[in-house]
Image (cartoon, rainbow, N blue to C red):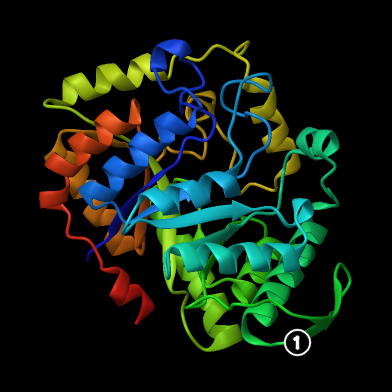
Amino acid sequence: MSIDLGYWTPVYGGFLRNVGREEGMAATWENIRDVSVAADRLGFHTTLVPELYLNDRKGVDAPSLEAWSLSAAILAVTDRLRVMTAVRPGFHLPAVLAKTVSTLDSVAAGRVALNVVAAWWAEEARQFGGAFTTHDERYVQAEEFVQVLRGLWTHTPFDFTGTHYQLEGTIVEPKPSVPPVVFAGGESDAGRESIARFGDAYVMHGGTLEEVRANVADMNSRSERIHGRPLAEFGMPAYVIVRDTEAEARRELERITTVDPDSPGYASFEEFQRNSKLSLELTRREYSVGTRGLRPELVGTAEQVAEKIHAYADAGITLLLIQSSPLKDELERIAAELFPLVPQRSLATIRG
């Protein structure tokens, strides 16, 4: 089985909660631009741009970049890279977002995708005025949000009456050249059922092979029941450490996972667990990089990591979203050492 290799854009600077400035990944456009141009040149397939107005990795007082303006800039300086931008419905008007996406598609036709996120961070919503309802209601809102987007991308004018949104005679022109792929993630039963109704694709936290197989089977079963077809893509983030020897890789893993519970990002990690209905408890080690990126254990030599990636492709993952540090240097290493060992799916295959 083949799999696409993408990466996670570090809007908050670096990925490592236990490593400070020495990580060398400032939250600046210059850094993101250099990573994006390099990734595009190297042939990485997709980047996920997370939407967070506060920095949950380095602490709320640390700088972080805004997802949608950043996505526009990334699309403008790249030629092939697909940009999957996260969107929290509680922070956006869907008609305005539909117009934004259509405009981005005119900048980079066919290279725009969405990751719809039911927000988890109450403090962020308080500071920025975002809507933050109950967990299950946030998925109701997300589902309506996507219904509005798709309606505006296919009909002119468009009317909608729902619990969260009402539109009458709304016009969005131009339309996107192709319907953007809509990813979403969630672990509660209500969240998964909602995503199976509105999502084209599912993005999960990092997991073991057994967890991934169960997630893929569950979401495909729901989609088959509702739409008569499986989901188009399954994405998973993973923190990747490739070194010449397994011992070197394990030393790097030990360095980045020495947890300080007093580190600036630990409070947001605890709030994430409180406000999300997770299917399993996170460990302090998994806190070290977020999104359970260490759980897949993609650590070792290129051959060892490639073997594990093949196993995840066989389990149903179609898109691996790599986290690594320092990101540009590690993407160069991964492209040189892993790409020859891991055949990638084509964008045409996905859209066909």
Q: Residue 98 lies in what quarter of the image? A: bottom right
Indicate the secondary structure of the residue bearing disc 1: loop
What residue is rendered at 46% in x and 29% in y?
A: 15
Where in the figure is residue 144, as x and y percent of width and height? 76, 71
Type of amino acid under label 1: Pro
What residue is rendered at 43% in x and 43% in y?
A: 8
Between 194 and 72, which is closer to the camera in this rendering? 72
What residue is rendered at 52% in x and 83% in y?
A: 224
The residue at which mark 1 appears reads as 157
Where in the figure is residue 45, as x and y percent of width and height? 32, 56
Is residue 146 in view? yes
Q: How many marks?
A: 1
In the picture, measured across the screen, residue 342 lies left or right of residue 7, that is left
Picture layout, residue 83 above or below residue 207: below
What residue is rendered at 74% in x and 38% in y?
A: 121
Picture layout, residue 228 above or below residue 192: below
Where in the figure is residue 276, as x and y percent of width and height? 70, 45
For disc 1, the neighbor class at 10 Å (few under 14, some 14 to 19, many from 20) is some
- Quarter containing the C terminus: bottom left
